Structures are given as C-alpha cells and as structure tokens.
Image (cartoon, rainbow, N blue to C red):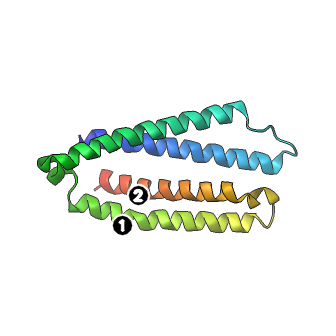
C-alpha cells in the first residue's frame, strides 16, 4: 500500500509539473510572439491530459487515504506521527515556493505586460506552491 501511495503521489506530481511547464511555455510564447494563437492545440491537449492525470491520481489517493484511516492497523503503519510531521513540515516548502513565484512574477511584470495577467500569476503561484509542498513531502517519505 505504501508503494501504491507513492506511485499515486508520483503521478500527481508528474501531472502538476507537466501542467506548470505548459503554462510557462504558453506565457513565454505570449511574451515573445507578437500575436500568438489563442491556445495551441498541443499545449491544450497536454494541459488537459496532465489535469486528467492529476484528478485521477487525487481521486485514487483520496480513496486510499480513506481506506487507511478506516483500518486502525493500516493507520498505525501508514499514517503515523512521522508521516503527519513530514506533511506539516512540507507546508513551509510549498509556502516558500509560492512566495518566490509571486516575487518572480512581480519582478517580470516590470519588463513585459504579459506577466501582468493576475489570473495566470495566481494560478501559477498556487500550482507551484502545491507542487513544492507535495514534492517535499514525497522526498521526505521516499528517502527517509
């Protein structure tokens, strides 16, 4: 079950990183190309597939977490204080990643009006924060 939990977390992280990468590619394209297409077909397909991967992994992870919480033996083995401590300490990494992203966008907005898009900035900041949090949690659990 621990391997399944880590595989689901890996899939979730892969989807988040793919979505974030495609969002950054799209932003750079908007900053460089004078009149870019509304949303390139390959970028749109990639974002949809990465979000489907994220949603499916989150749903499966939620079902697994519910199953772990219902069984006291599994909860003691897989959801102990150490794992909860890793999850809590990983929040600071996520917060730092989100704060750094917001600062980067604030700096870049002085050079290009493309980076003034507040919705894109907020969405990217949230995704980077989530990715940082889950990546720190994954690394702590995997390599401990």
Q: Nearer the viewer, residue 24 or 116?
A: 116
Where is residue 116? Give x, y as percent: 75, 61
Mark seen at residue 3 = none
Q: Mark 2 and 1 residues: CB-CB less than 8 Å, in contact?
A: yes
Q: Read off the residue under disc 2.
A: 136
Residue visible at 84% across and 45% down? Answer: 33
Quadrant of residue 6 within the rendered picture:
top left
Q: Nearer the viewer, residue 117 or 13?
A: 117
Question: Which quadrant: the C terminus?
Answer: bottom left
Q: Which residue is mark 1?
A: 89
Residue 94 is left or right of residue 121, and the answer is: left
Give the number of callouts. Answer: 2
Q: Is residue 57 above or below residue 131?
A: above
Residue 101 in the figure: left or right of residue 107: left
Residue 27 percent location from the top left of the image: 72, 49
Q: Quadrant of the N terminus?
A: top left
Q: Say what secondary structure mark 2 lies in.
A: helix
> Residue shown at 82%/49% (left/top)?
32
């Amino acid at each position: 079950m621990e391997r399944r939990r880590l595989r689901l977390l890996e899939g979730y992280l892969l989807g988040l990183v793919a979505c974030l990468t495609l969002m950054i590619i799209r932003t750079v394209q908007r900053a460089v190309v004078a009149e870019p297409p509304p949303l390139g077909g390959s970028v749109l397909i990639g974002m949809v597939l990465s979000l489907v991967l994220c949603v499916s992994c989150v749903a499966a992870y939620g079902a697994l977490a519910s199953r772990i919480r219902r069984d006291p033996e599994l909860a003691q083995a897989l959801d102990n204080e150490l794992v909860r401590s890793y999850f809590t300490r990983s929040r600071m990494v996520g917060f730092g990643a989100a704060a750094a992203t917001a600062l980067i966008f604030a700096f870049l907005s002085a050079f290009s009006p493309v980076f003034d898009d507040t919705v894109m900035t907020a969405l990217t900041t949230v995704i980077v924060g989530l990715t940082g949090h889950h990546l720190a949690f994954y690394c702590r659990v995997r390599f401990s």
